Image (cartoon, rainbow, N blue to C red):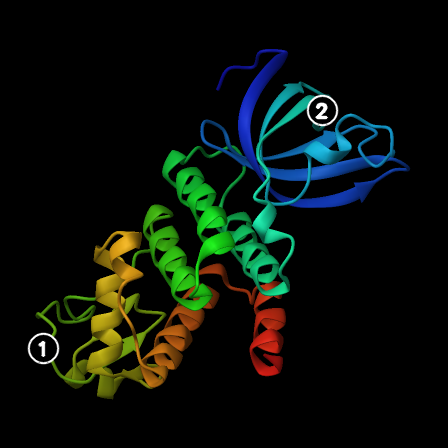
Amino acid sequence: MSRERVYRVDALILKRADMGEADRLLTIYTPARGKLRVVAKGARKPQSRKSGHVELFTHVNLQIARGRSLDIVTQAEIIDPFLALRGDLSRTAYAYYAAELVDQFAEEEQANPAVFDLLRDAFGWIGQTGDLWLTTRFLEMHLLAFFGYQPQLHNCVLGDEPIEPVDNYFDAAQGGVLCPRHGEALKEARPLSLNALKALRFMQSREYAEVMRVQFGAPTRAEVEAVMQRYIQHVLERRLKSTDFLRLLERTS
């Protein structure tokens, strides 16, 4: 990677934290440099020119100077503020989840332009969609693929035989679907209905606009979400903090 003293990046702001008396520590995702941690000096001061340009979930253009330990934001300009993510608690919560997913999957300074494009699009979708659940499942499925963890949904992950159109099994540790013969033999494998398998395959293989035209019943939705959450938690080896708040919202809505 080039080590120029000053560089510019387009970035999506994933996370921020207070640092010192007036600074902000930002976790950003960029198309050419992947995930970075940078400091916005003085961004918490009311008169700072950066303060309104380094909000969570914004698409920004940043000028950054090399620092000894952390690089420093010297200029910031908003490209898209994604304002719809801020006026609605549910949309804000799903945006937090999307940002946390990318933050947890991404390694620092590992470029993946497809992830940047997907997350940028997802912030726009989350601000507009009438089905936050389906938008989020689509995002999960395609992020898994872009980070190299796409679940196997067409052949048994143990025997490699084609999966028949019947109820099967899913095992997060094995990385996908198991036929009845292999699934019944594995203690950790969970039953997977044919409807849930079809829904997972559809989301994996179709574009966003096509997926959003499909309606899934409540039992299928619950099963698909459970499969995706178990798989993501297995891959990351941790539970995402934002999932608990999303569940609380679901219970109170």
Residue 231 sits above or below residue 206 on the image: below
The residue that appears at 25% across and 71% down in the rendered structure is 199
Task: Choose between 190 and 41: the one closer to the eye.
Answer: 41
Residue at horizontal 69%, vertical 32%?
A: 53
Specify the amino acid type for callout 2: Ile
Amino acid carrying mark 1 in the image: Glu
Residue 151 in view (yes/no): no
Q: Earlier in the sequence, mark 1 or mark 2?
A: 2
Q: Residue at x 26, y 51 (%)?
A: 207
Local SS, label 2:
strand
Q: Quadrant of the C terminus?
A: bottom right
- Judging by the rendered image, the residue that carries numbered circle 2 is 72
Q: CA distance from mark 1 to mark 2?
A: 55 Å
x, y percent for residue 122 = 44, 49
Please state if 3 lies on the left or on the right of 161 as rendered: right
- Residue 204 in percent (x, y) is at 26, 59
Does 75 sit left or right of 136 as displayed? right
Q: To which residue does mark 1 refer?
A: 164
Residue 36: x, y in percent? Answer: 59, 34
Query: Pointer 2: residues within 10 angstroms few (<14), some, or many (20+)?
Result: many
